[in-house]
Amino acid sequence: MEQKSKGKDGFFHLLQEFICLVFLHHVYLLLSVNEKNQQEFSSKEKHCIQLSETSVESLLNSASLTLKELEIPREKLSLGTLQLIKHGRYGSIYRAQLETGNPEKTKTVVLKALQDLSSPQKVKDFLGRIKFHQNLGHHENLVELIGCCVGQLPLYMIMEDVSLGDLLTFLWTCRKDVMTMDGIPYDLTERQVYKVGQQVAAALAYLEQKKLFHGDIAARNVLLHHNFTAKLCGLGLAYEAHTYGVSSVTQIVPVKWQAPERLLQKPPSIKADIWSFGILLYEMITLGAPPYPEVPPSDILLYLQRQNIMKQPSSCQQTMYNIMKSCWQWNANSRPSPADLIQSLKTAMKTSNDHAVLQVPELVVPELYANIAGIDVHSLVSEYTVL
């Protein structure tokens, strides 16, 4: 009996070992399957990354076709002449020389570069800005797109160079005791203010025809050529609103240049540009003074809601101040259109003073200006926003 019992115990022991082995085998199989699944998922992840890389490649392939007529052979750019202007939103902005076909003559251009292709969205946005400018077409008072290089890294958007730089810096230079610098007269008369104003208004009229608006009219976004041609630049907000919709605009505009409806979060429009144009006239006639010098930026909306506007500067004649006031109507519909504005400026220009040079004795301290104007002081250093 005892031997039978031992035999039975031995059998059960073997059976338990067998069940354990089967169980361990199943666990091993499950772990193997799980590891295989993980490897497949990892492989799919890698495949997705490759897909995203391919999408950048496909964007560039597509761009090389859609922007074919704008493509400039990279060897025509004298990359040894690259001069850094500033670090832009997506990459660096340079000044460089472009071959013109005449071996003895090159043309100075501005390059906006995109070096990083890690984000398909950034690439798409950069290419979209080139296409936007191409579709915008040519206007003598808008900074001109010359071409692009999108065949290889880095991607370049090639813009015309405007010799005198931004209007705000020019206005500040006019405060200094210099009549000429490199043969360029650094003085400004009332008539010249009207002349620059007409050119900016002409650019606005052109944008209005295209059913666009600028969104950031200010002296810092106007460039001057050596023949005193004004060119409006800084069309980033216009591009964002046109491409992604007004509610998707990310660009921040300093509050002192904004119309009341913009401060109240209403959509931007050409009528809001007209309000900002009045601020631009104030900037020019005061040789670059900050708007509302006595009002902190945080209080500007309350100031305007109390029906206040800027006081008439001592250097400003009544006719010009009347034009400013027409731009600063609280009701947007009461403001003039760009065409109305051009007519008012032309009429006023006929009787304007072309002899007395505008003079402001105080030199500008950028840090103090930035604090009063409510803008970033770093944006004043080599300010040059081509798009």
Image: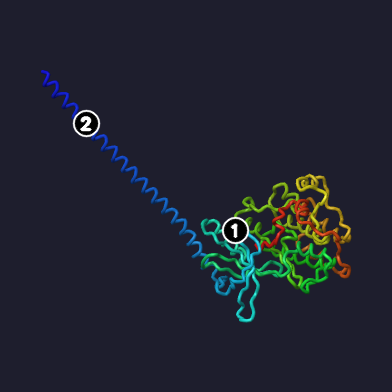
Which of the two residues, 70 or 165, is positioned nearer the viewer here?
165
The three-letter code of the residue at mark 1 reads: Tyr
The residue tagged with tag 2: helix, strand or loop? helix
The three-letter code of the residue at mark 2 reads: Glu
Residue 58 screen position, x and y as percent: 48, 62
> Residue tagged by mark 2?
17
Q: Quadrant of the image for the N terminus? A: top left
Residue 37: assigned label: none
First in sequence, mark 1 or 2: give its number.
Answer: 2
> Residue tagged by mark 1?
90
Residue 35 screen position, x and y as percent: 34, 44
- Picture colour scheme: rainbow
Left or right: residue 78 compared with residue 267 = left
Question: Which residue is farthest top?
Answer: 1
Residue 342 screen position, x and y as percent: 78, 65
How far apart, in angstroms, are the residues tagged by discs 1 and 2?
Answer: 67 Å
- Mark 1 burial class by Cα count in 10 Å: few <14, some 14-19, many 20+: some
Q: Nearer the viewer, mark 1 or mark 2?
A: 2
Left or right: residue 216 compared with residue 243 = right
Q: Are marks 1 and 2 in contact (CB under 8 Å)?
A: no
Residue at x 58% of width, y 60% of height: 126
Residue at x 61% of width, y 63% of height: 132
